Image (cartoon, rainbow, N blue to C red):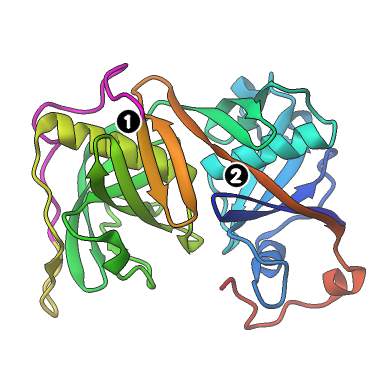
């Protein structure tokens, strides 16, 4: 089994070429590959497969030749990955599967267009960023209210008036599962300058990562709405033992994200910086994509049974 390793602002992936869709990829193998001590180590797996070889690909994505089959480190399947799709595009170009500069890539969130700006820098049309009410999260024993944003996958963006570096994201946040039955990516975001924010993220299925592309778009969208509405932000509130967090209200005054009004934002993440133009119709995400290595997975490792304690770290 061939593989490559890549990352976008520290959000790292194992890339598996499987043009004909013959690879028997399952949750257990994904977890083993992503294990940082017993496997290759990654936040997720990108399977490179021809869209024609994906039986359940939606009809609207069949016009794109390649399908990004993205799996989180815990073996769950995700709709979209903004850092991953840039790495995916670079892999296609460098291995002769596609020609630069513009690529159409099929995902579970629909077709995404990617443009190669330089050999290292890629811009993705992430589609609409849709704001839709608020929710809550308990992070490190503190209650936060956040804005729900969809970028093809769900996000809860908590705008905070405290350094994001001091927030405890070592454990998965407790969230309102009635509002997010399929789980949610949780971002904590602080304003650091005009159209500049810092962000940390806990991704469903992967834990805290150094970066999240869809999360950066969601964070910029939430920041744009918050600033435009003049809504004050606050630090998290300690949650008393046994007292459940309560959900917030509706959208900030002034409504949700509007087309063409947000402008360009810089999103600083633990793994670097991304440039985002959040939009209600077509959001743009620009950032680096790096291919670290190409190689072959040991047949004996593949044949070995999974260890019971083999989990992503």
Q: Is residue 149 visible?
A: no
In the image, 243 versus 284, the foreground residue is: 284
Q: Earlier in the sequence, mark 1 or mark 2?
A: 2
Residue 170 placement: quadrant: bottom left
Q: Which range of residues does the magenta coloring cover?
A: 246-264
Image quarter (top left, top right, bottom left or bottom right) of the N terminus: bottom right
| Contact between labelled residues 2 and 1, with CB atoms less than 8 Å apart | no
184 shown above or below 124:
below
Residue found 60% across the figure and 44% down from its top: 84
Residue labelled with disc 2:
84
**How much space separates mark 1 and mark 2, taking CA atoms?**
21 Å
Q: Is residue 85 visible?
A: yes
155 shown above or below 107:
below
Image quarter (top left, top right, bottom left or bottom right) of the C terminus: bottom right
Residue labelled with disc 1:
130
Magenta-drawn stretch contains 286? no
Residue 299 placement: quadrant: bottom right
Residue found 11% across the figure and 73% down from its top: 243
Question: Would you say 229 lies left or right of 70 here?
Answer: left
Rendered location of residue 39, percent (x, y): 72, 71
């Amino acid at each position: 089994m061939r593989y490559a390793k890549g990352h976008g602002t520290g959000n790292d992936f194992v890339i598996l070429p499987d043009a004909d869709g013959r690879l028997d990829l399952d949750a257990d193998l994904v977890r083993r590959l992503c294990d940082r001590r017993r496997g290759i180590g990654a936040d997720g797996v990108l399977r490179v497969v021809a869209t024609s070889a994906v039986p359940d690909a939606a009809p609207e994505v069949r016009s794109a030749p390649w399908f990004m089959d993205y799996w989180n480190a815990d073996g769950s399947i995700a709709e979209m990955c903004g850092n991953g799709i840039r790495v995916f595009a670079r892999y296609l170009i460098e291995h002769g599967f596609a020609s630069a500069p513009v690529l159409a890539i099929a995902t579970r969130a629909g077709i995404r267009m990617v443009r190669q700006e330089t050999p290292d820098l890629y811009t993705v049309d992430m589609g609409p960023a849709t704001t839709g009410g608020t929710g809550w999260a308990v992070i490190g024993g503190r209650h936060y209210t956040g804005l729900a944003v969809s970028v093809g996958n769900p996000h809860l963006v908590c705008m905070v008036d405290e350094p994001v570096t001091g927030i405890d994201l070592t454990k998965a946040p407790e969230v309102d599962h009635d509002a997010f039955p399929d789980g949610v990516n949780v971002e904590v975001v602080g304003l650091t300058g005009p159209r500049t924010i810092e962000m940390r993220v806990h991704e469903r299925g992967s834990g805290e990562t150094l970066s999240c592309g869809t999360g950066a778009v969601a964070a910029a969208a939430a920041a744009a709405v918050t600033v435009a509405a003049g809504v004050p932000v606050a630090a998290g509130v300690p949650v008393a033992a046994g007292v459940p967090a309560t959900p917030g209200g509706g959208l900030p005054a002034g409504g949700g994200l509007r087309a063409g009004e947000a402008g360009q934002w810089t999103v600083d993440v633990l793994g670097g910086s991304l440039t985002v133009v959040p939009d209600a119709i077509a959001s743009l995400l620009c950032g680096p994509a790096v291919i670290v290595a190409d190689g072959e997975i040991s047949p004996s490792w593949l044949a070995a049974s999974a260890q019971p304690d083999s989990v992503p770290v």
